[in-house]
Image (cartoon, grey):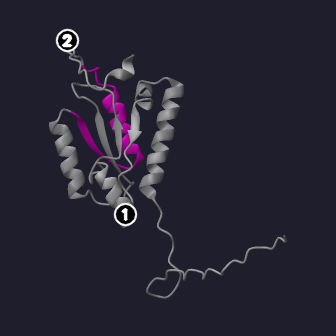
């Protein structure tokens, strides 16, 4: 029995995408994503410094709804509950009579994109449901909104909290 190197077929190189002038097109920069990552690093720093914003760090999560996806992947995610317009970050800390904070982050102008109608509707729906809903244009506005929200008094639950029986096995 002899061993031989498997033959590989040459895969043709992709043609680089070009703009109207014929020069190679640059990859788009995800300014919003970079600012969101910087915001999460800032929250981590606030946790280490034990500032008034620190409790937000452990209760903040991103909703990866944005970006472009291929048809099959998009259909699969839609079937699993992905919705257009859902805000970028959620801070699940009740403050100021609100249940939590929904934060839609756009890149700092002039690199910001407009607020889509589905995003505007989502923010309005969350506000109607008892959440604080904000649009932040850039990292500095996002920090200011979080600082302001976290400086509000904790939301108090009045009366006894009702429990549901289905799905509570995790408490055992």
Q: Nearer the viewer, residue 112 or 87?
A: 87
Read off the magenta span.
131-155
Determine which residue is flagged by label 1: 72
Q: What separation in Å lies between label 1 and label 2 (alpha carbons)?
A: 46 Å
Q: Residues within 10 Å of mark 1 (few under 14, many from 20)?
A: few
Q: Residue at x 17, y 35 (%)?
A: 129
Quarter the C terminus occupies = top left
Residue beneath the point at 49% across and 45% down: 38
Residue lying at 29% horizontally and 39% vertically, measured from the top left: 102
How many numbered markers are drawn? 2
Residue at screen point 35% across, 21% down = 169
x and y percent of residue 109 in the render?
37, 57
Res 6 → quadrant: bottom right
Residue beneath disc 2: 160
Residue furthest to the right in view is 2
Looking at the rendered structure, the secondary structure element under dot 2 is loop
The answer to whether residue 110 is visible is: no
In the displayed structure, would residue 143 be above or below residue 151?
below
Whether residue 13 is situated above or below residue 106 in the rendered picture: below
Q: Which mark is residue 165?
A: none
Percent of width and height locating residue 22: 50, 88
Query: Which mark sits nearer the N-terminus, 1 or 2?
Result: 1
The answer to whether residue 4 is above or below residue 46 is: below
**What quarter of the picture does the N terminus occupy?**
bottom right
- Residue 115 position by quadrant: bottom left
- Callout 1: helix, strand or loop? helix
Picture layout, residue 108 above or below residue 19? above
Q: Position of residue 29 (x, y in %)?
A: 48, 63
* Residue 116 position in % (x across, y down): 25, 58
Asked if residue 56 lies in the magenta stretch, the reply is no
Mark 1 vs 2: CB contact within 8 A: no
Which label sits in the foreground, 1 or 2? 1
């Amino acid at each position: 029995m002899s061993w031989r190197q498997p033959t590989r077929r040459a895969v043709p190189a992709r043609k680089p995408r070009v703009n109207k002038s014929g020069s190679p097109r640059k990859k788009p920069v995800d300014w919003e994503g970079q600012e969101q990552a910087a915001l999460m690093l800032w929250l981590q720093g606030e946790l280490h410094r034990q500032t008034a914003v620190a409790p937000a760090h452990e209760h903040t999560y991103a909703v990866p709804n944005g970006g472009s996806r291929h048809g099959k992947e998009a259909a699969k995610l839609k079937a699993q509950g992905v919705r257009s317009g859902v805000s970028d970050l959620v801070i699940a800390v009740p403050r100021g009579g609100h249940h939590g904070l929904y934060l839609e982050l756009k890149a700092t102008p002039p690199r910001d994109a407009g607020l889509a109608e589905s995003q505007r509707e989502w923010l309005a729906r969350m506000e109607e449901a008892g959440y604080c809903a904000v649009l932040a244009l850039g990292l500095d506005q996002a920090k200011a909104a979080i600082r302001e929200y976290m400086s509000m008094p904790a939301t108090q639950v009045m009366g006894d909290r009702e429990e549901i029986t289905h799905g509570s096995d995790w408490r055992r």
